[in-house]
Amino acid sequence: MIIGNKEFKNYTYVLAIVNLTPDSFWKNSRNDEYTVLKTVEKAITDGASVIDLGAQSTRPGYSEVSADCEISRLERPLQLIKKNFDIPVSVDTYFYECAKASLEMGADMINDIWGLTHDSGMAELIAKHKASVCIMHNAQKTLEGDIWKQITAFLQKSVSLALDAGIGRNKICLDGGIGFAKTKEQNHELLNGYNRLAALGYPLLLGTSRKSMFGGNVEDRLLQTVESTRLAAKYGVTFVRVHDVKENFEAIREVYG
């Protein structure tokens, strides 16, 4: 897969979560324009290959903020990162207007938790900017029955939107959406069978970092996160999206030897 000026293949890479929100569920991931450069520098030193900027918390029970609010949070940090570092930057948004502003400021990928279905024109916008996209599965209601058929159907439909709009096949990756519209049991089922999604023919991204599926307090979920990263590496998943870069990077390196 290509993101920005970098190619990612035959390995598992770390996509570092850098939140620009005051309410993200993991407080250590919260940043603003005054802390973001130090945070990104550390992430790169610790082994991050991509930076994923989020200007809206999507934790369980979150209160949605507007696209304008996202843009105001993103603008200065994104410009600073692009000016100071040679690393691909993904922006986590499902709003067309925020994606447009981010791409115009130099973002390399849009990480859309609604798989290009929330705002019309999102796929065409990404194609116009020759950017990459991460398509995640989501649903309005918690899944019932066979989760694999529903996840696969959603992702296939979203991939068709991307291809029809002109997004290059080598600029698409897929995320099964752990923690979104799924029960704890379904999240574990998805994680343990994550390699089944490879049959769709695209690189995969896994996002489990410190999520509630692991139980307990958010502060105590690092070990489970690292174990899920090891599993992802064994499955050949291309990206893991994590808060704790160093620990997950080292786990990947252990698997690949």
Image: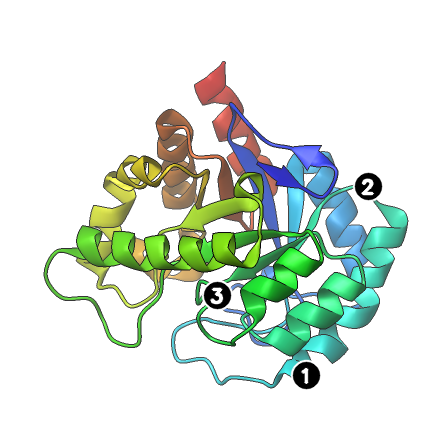
Residue that mark 1 sits on: 69
Amino acid carrying mark 1 in the image: Cys
**Rendering quarter of residue 213:** bottom left
Residue 53 appears in view: no
Q: Earlier in the sequence, mark 1 or mark 2?
A: 1
| Residue 78 visible, this orientation | yes
Residue occupying image coordinates x 35% and y 55%:
155
- Crowding at label 3, few (<14), some or many (≥20) Cα neighbours within 10 Å? many
Q: What amino acid does circle 3 point to?
A: Leu
Looking at marks 1 and 3 on the same chain, the residue that comes earlier in the sequence is marked by: 1
Give the SS element for disc 1: helix
Q: Spatial distance from mark 1 to mark 3, Cα to Cα?
A: 20 Å
Q: Badges 2 and 3: C-beta atoms under 8 Å apart?
A: no
x then y, percent, for residue 105:
81, 63
Q: Secondary structure at mark 2?
A: loop
Q: CA distance from mark 1 to mark 2?
A: 26 Å
State the quadrant of the N terminus: top right
Indicate which label's residue lies in the foreground, 1 or 3: 3
**Which residue is tagged 2?**
86
Position of residue 149 measured from the top left corner of the image (x, y, whole percent): 19, 53
Q: How many residues crowd mark 1 within 10 Å: few (<14), some (14–19), many (20+)? A: few
The residue furthest left is: 145
Give the label on residue 116, or none. Answer: 3
SS at mark 3 in the image: loop
The three-letter code of the residue at mark 2 reads Asp
Going from N to C along the chain, the mark reached first, 2 or 3, is 2
Number of numbered labels in the structure image: 3
